[in-house]
Amino acid sequence: MLFGKILVAYDGSKLSKKALEKAVSLAQEISTITRPTRLEVIHVLYHPPVNIGEAFVTIPVGTSSNYSENLQPIIDEIKELSYPLEHVEIIIKQGIPVTTILEYAEESGTDLIVMGSRGLSGIKEFFLGSVSHNVVQQAHIPVLIVK
């Protein structure tokens, strides 16, 4: 199966770096067989709600004074890891990672989602689940999990 558009979920972790490297390699292989594969890398900013008294409040990203300072190293890292490819787009979104990744994949016509396996352990996974697990369960397109 040849993929025209690959979406990589990237959070800067070791496994997301491996996933990006795998996606770059896959895109290069496909591009030698057919037309160039478009690679998109999505980084989702997630700020969990904070409990203030009886209310839960989500702090907007823009309130952080060093927001762009924290984001630039991630963008630079993505560019460095995806260097050999010509067709790479970096997408920065804010939201709940699973929902944001799946919505973007559907909106953009993605053929394959590539991401690292970063499951939570034990009781945490039972209650919360992991991003990769939930993406696999809910996606309507193939998902490649890199270990």
Image: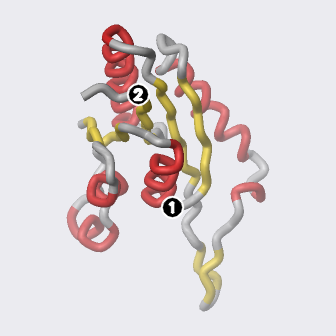
The residue sitting at the front extreme is 34
Q: Quadrant of residue 91?
A: top right
Q: Which residue is mark 1?
A: 96
Between marks 1 and 2 in the image, the one whose residue lies nearer the viewer? 2
* In front of the other: 45 or 136: 136
* In front of the other: 49 or 35: 35
Q: How many marks?
A: 2
Q: Quadrant of residue 77?
A: top right
Local packing at callout 2 (Cα closer than 10 Å; few below 14, some 14-19, many 20+) is: some
From what the image shows, is residue 49 above or below residue 43?
below
Q: Amino acid at mark 2?
A: Gly
Circle 1 — which element?
loop
Quadrant location, the C terminus = top left
Task: Left or right? Give the position of 97 relative to 18.
Answer: right
From what the image shows, is residue 101 above or below residue 70?
below
Circle 2 — which element?
loop
Q: Residue at x 50, y 32 (%)?
A: 40
Q: Amino acid at mark 1?
A: Ile
Q: Which mark is residue 26?
A: none
In the rendered image, residue 46, in percent from the top left (x then y), is placed at: 55, 57
Q: Which residue is mark 2?
A: 4
Task: Left or right? Give the position of 138 relative to 122.
Answer: right
From what the image shows, is residue 36 above or below residue 100?
above
Q: Residue at x 35, y 32 (%)?
A: 19
* In front of the other: 90 or 139: 139
In the rendered image, residue 23, in percent from the top left (x then y), is placed at: 36, 26
Quadrant location, the N terminus = top left
Task: Left or right? Give the position of 24 relative to 92.
Answer: left
In the rendered image, residue 107, in percent from the top left (x then y), is placed at: 52, 49
In the rendered image, residue 88, in percent from the top left (x then y), is placed at: 54, 24
Cα distance, mark 1 to mark 2? 26 Å
